Amino acid sequence: MIIGPKYKICKRLGSSVFEKCQTQKFQLAEARAPRKTSRPKRGGGTDFGVQLLEKQKARFTYGLSESQFSRYVHEAMESKGAAAGLLLNRLEARLDNVIYRAGFVKTRRAARQLVSHGHVMVNGRRLNVPSYKAELGDVVSIRQESRGSALFANRADVMAETKAPAWIGFEDQGFAAKIAAVPSVGETEAPFNAATIIQFYSR
C-alpha cells in the first residue's frame, strides 16, 4: 500500500501512527514546531471530519488498504458483541501484527515482509498470509532455517526487552509466540478511537 511521506501523515493526523514517528527526535521536533493559526481544513471540525480522522489513524497504524479495513469494520458490526472491541480484536489478531507484538521485528511493515517471504510458521505449518487471523492456542514461530539470520541475533536479549501484550506467551527460547488469550488491545491504549470509527461506517 502506497501511503506517502510518513512524517507528513503523522503531522496531519496528529498521531504517531508509524514507528518512524515514535522517536524522541520526532516528538521534540513536533513540540518545537510553531503552531499554525490558520483556520482548520474543510470538514476538520465536523463529526464527519473527526470520524474520518480516526479511521485514517487506524488504517495507517496497521498498514491496511481502505477495502481491507472496511471489511474488518463491517465484520465487527455484523457480529454479536461490542463492535468497537471486536474491531480492535480483529486488527490485533492479524498474523503480521502478532509478529510485531512479539518483538520479532521492530515494525508492522517488516513483520508483513517477514510473513510474506515465508519465514513464519503457524502450528508447525509454513504460512505467508499476513492477514491470517491468529486464534486462541495458535503457536506462531520463526522457521528453523530462518533463525540463523542476523535479524534474530541475540533473540533472548531482545525478548527480555520486548513489552509483549499479556495475550502472548513465549516458547522455544523466544522463537515461538503462543496465543494465550484472545488478541486484544484496550480502547484507551489504541492510538485511535474505535467507537468513533464504527460511527463513521454506520452513517
Image (tube, rainbow, N blue to C red):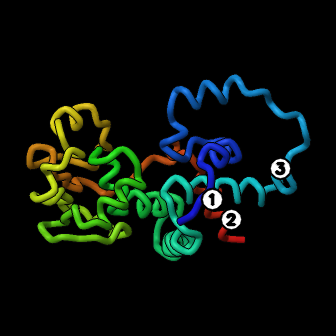
The amino acid at mark 1 is: Lys
Q: Earlier in the sequence, mark 3 or mark 2?
A: 3
Name the side, left or right, on which 18 lies relative to 157: right
Residue 129 sits in quarter: bottom left
Q: Earlier in the sequence, mark 3 or mark 1?
A: 3
Which residue bears the numbered disc 1?
Answer: 55
Which residue bears the numbered disc 3?
Answer: 45
Name the one closer to the observer, 75 or 44.
44
Tell me if I can see residue 40 in this picture.
yes
Residue at point 32%, 55% (across, down): 98
The amino acid at mark 2 is: Phe
Name the side, left or right, on which 130 lies relative to 192: left
Name the side, left or right, on which 96 lies relative to 154: right
Mark 3 and mark 2: Cα distance apart in space? 14 Å
Residue 165 sits in quarter: top left
Percent position of residue 48, x then y: 77, 60
